[in-house]
Amino acid sequence: MCHTNYWIIFLLPSIILLLIGIILLIAINATMLPYSWMGTIQKGWITGIAEKISYSLQIQLKENGPKLVASITNQNTVEKIRPMMEEEVEKFLREKLPAQMPMISMFIGDRTINQLKEIFVSEVEVIFPMFMEKYVSENILNNSNLNDQIKETIEKTLVSSIPKIVKQHSFRFLLILLLAGGVIGLAQVGMSHLLLN
């Protein structure tokens, strides 16, 4: 067998794999972002990934929403914020209320402030869980705009990072294909040499 045929057998797999790799990279880059195909706008695979992730997060929020609400509104959470509530109510009663209504400060002493503080804090402990449950339910769990914002944020992140990753690894990918083709070609040359001799 002629040496030229050995070169063709050796190089052909490398050339084919290299061409496949180049076509694949062109296809990945061309379809990454929204593009036009036969007159219709296609959304691109990054947008598709962002939609799938945001949909998955939305499902997780819906499934775990009651647990989230329960963890925010349970008695332990309210007990943890009670010292902060007491401090803020006392500051309001001792500083802000007398500044806004000086006449009241003449009639309110420490005993009255402590009683009012206890009443306000007790009322906040009752109102807080109801308020948080309603807020989380309306503004987080059942908010269609939130899903759009999540999708938009994920898409922006992917659009800014994936092209860089593809660009960074393109040469390495093509080099691996070229080397794999060389190994396949070398194996073919060795096999054909053994079979012909």
Image: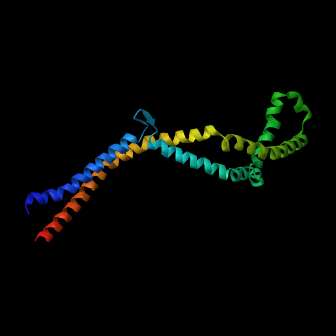
Q: Say how many tags the image has.
A: 0
Location of the C terminus by quadrant is bottom left
Left or right, 65 with respect to 91, comes to: left
Q: Quadrant of residue 28?
A: top left
**Where residue 84 sits: x, y (%)?**
75, 46
Look at 76% across and 50% down and name the residue there: 78
Q: Residue furthest left?
A: 2
Left or right, 9 with respect to 164, comes to: left
Look at 20% across and 65% down and name the residue there: 187
Q: Viewer-proximal residue, 154 or 189?
A: 189
Q: Viewer-proximal residue, 176 or 9?
A: 9
Query: Taking 176 as reference, is 33 above or below it?
Result: above
Location of the N terminus by quadrant is bottom left
Q: Viewer-proximal residue, 61 or 122?
A: 61
**Where residue 71 sits: x, y (%)?**
71, 53
**Where residue 114 sits: x, y (%)?**
87, 44
Look at 81% across and 29% down and name the residue there: 99
Left or right, 196 with respect to 151, comes to: left
Look at 61% across and 47% down and name the residue there: 58
Q: Viewer-proximal residue, 54 or 105?
A: 54
